[in-house]
Every structure is written in C-alpha cells, then in structure tokens.
Amino acid sequence: MTTNHFPAVRISTKRLNDFFAGFLKELRSKKPETKGTYERALREFFRWYPADNHFQFRVQDVERYKKYLSSKKKLSEVSVSTYLTALRQFCAYLVRIGILHDNPAKEVKGNKRPQKHSRETISQDELALLLNSIDRSDERGVRDYAVVKAMIGCGFSEIELIRANIDDVKIYSHAMVLFVQGKGKDTKEGVVLPEEVKEAIQSYLAFRSEAGGGDPLFMSAGNRTRGKRMTTRGIRQRVNMYLENAGIKNGKARRITPFSLRHTAASLMATNGATVEELQSRFRIGSATTAMLYMKQNEKSL
C-alpha cells in the first residue's frame, strides 16, 4: 500500500483516551518494563494530539509527529525511535479492534542507532574524585560508596542494584558473586565481584546485621522510607549529587549521568583488551553491535 492510500480517520480525544485504556489493559501480559515504556511514550502523543488538532492517522500525520519530537521536544534519536515504536504498537491495536484499516506508523521509520553512546565516560582521576567525595562516616555514605563501587567495578545498572536482595550475594570459595536481574530479564545471573567491590558491600552489610536474606541489598535510609528498597530515582539522585560535589557534572556541554559509570567501566575494560564477547558477558549486553560501540570508542581515543 502506498502512503497516499491511507484514509483519513478522525477520532475525538475522549474516544482516543478510551482506546488508550483498552490498549493498556492488553499490555498487562507484557513485562512491566515494556508496559511502562509504552505508557510513558504514548502520554506525549496524547498531550500533543489535541494541540495538533489535525492528526487523522495518515502517514504524513505520523511524520509530522516525528518532526515535532525531534524539532520541538528536541528528543534524542533513540527516544524518538522509542516514541514511534509505542505509537506503532498503539495503531496496531486500533487495527485489531477495527478502528483503523491499516497502520500508518508502520510506514514511518525510526532513527538510526547512534554510532556512539550518548553519555560520556569519566577519567580515572575523576573516578577518584567521585569516590573521595562520598562521606563514609555513616550508614548512608557507606551504602552510597558501595553502590558507586558496584557501578564502576561491575557496570551494574540502577535497576540491577535495586532488584538485588541480600541473599543474592553468594560466597563461593574466596569469591563473592552477586546475582542480578537486568531490565527485560526473567532470571538472575551471577557476576563475580572484584575485591574492592566485595569489600565495599561487606562494609555496608555490617550495618545490616539484623536484616533477612529476602530484604533489599540496598535499602533506603530516608526517615519516611527507611527499610524500603531504594528506587532507580533514588540512586540517580544520590550519584548525581556526588558527581556535582566532585565537580564532574559541570554544565550541559558534558553528558555525565549515573549511567556514565557503566559506560566508564565498559570502556576501561575495552582499553585493557577485552573482547566483544567478554564485554557482552560482563555487562549483560544482548547485542554485539552495542558492545562494539565501546571497542570503536576505545580505538578513537588511542
């Protein structure tokens, strides 16, 4: 079907919101992360839809929405692709329930994958500044130090750390292994902890002597949330605070975020001669193409 043959379909905002509710119900069988991503991405479309007031589910309408995401919202190429994927899935739902005859979003491609990571890495001197900025005189500081050490030493993501329980820490001979469950994963996989990460986690667990095995490995220390599992937002706020205190997160020109610690860990491993397969295994990366970005980044820096 050519792009000119998509019939115009007008749907009121109220009706479209009803269809959105039905779409979310259908997503209940999906992984929570998938459902959450689609829901967040589509909320932008539902904010834009009544303001645009001309969207009629044609290819040119989807292309106009894509231009809005890039030009007006100034989203990254990856984010634009994610938002279009969500819209594509929603339009497919409208086709299934007989509202649309064809899916116009299928005709609009997402952006190409970036040729480098969107976050920058941190130098070894900056890593030292970051670690030295953490005051380890109380439980919260010791916890934060263990979190940062785990992110640098093992490339753990926030979600892997907040999902971990105390009994996910296993000792085999002289090695400490932490079993983590990444985004979109159904099972946990073990990662051998370097000695420095092992010592940092042991120091933190010394404060948690009364905790049970099913308790979160990293616990919130706030007055109202103490005893609860840390959140991804909580970890990001704490790490961002230390990045700012250390003078590393210095302005918009540098894209330094907590996820930069993972990129730094992978880049250091690539610098030290790791293979693509080793990077995939160590950092739980599904795509060899993604792992290759670290190799290419390292080659450019030589």
Image (cartoon, rainbow, N blue to C red):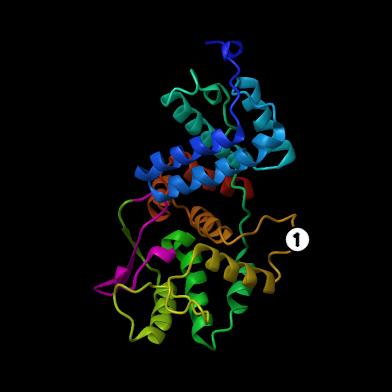
The answer to if 167 sits in the magenta stretch is yes
Q: Quadrant of residue 242?
A: bottom right
Question: Disc 1 designates what residue?
Answer: 251
In this rendering, would 215 be left or right of 70?
A: left
**Does residue 154 lie above or below 72 as drawn?**
below
In this rendering, would 249 be left or right of 172?
A: right
Give me the residue at 65% from left, 27% from top: 55
> Tag 1's secondary structure?
loop
**Does residue 244 lie above or below 56 as drawn?**
below
**Does residue 154 lie above or below 85 as drawn?**
below
- Residue found farthest to the bottom: 137
Q: Nearer the viewer, residue 111 or 291?
A: 111
Q: Position of residue 231 (x, y in %)?
A: 49, 66
Give me the residue at 71% from left, 36% from top: 51
In this rendering, would 24 be left or right of 113?
A: left
Q: Position of residue 280 (x, y in %)?
A: 41, 48
Give me the residue at 42% from left, 48% from top: 285
Range drawn in magenta: 161-185
Q: Position of residue 42 (x, y in %)?
A: 56, 40
The answer to if 173 sits in the magenta stretch is yes
Q: Nearer the viewer, residue 227 or 201?
A: 227
Residue 213 visible in the displayed image: yes
In this rendering, would 282 be left or right of 145?
A: left
User: Which amino acid is tagged 1?
Assistant: Gly
Q: Residues within 10 Å of mark 1 (few under 14, many from 20)?
A: few
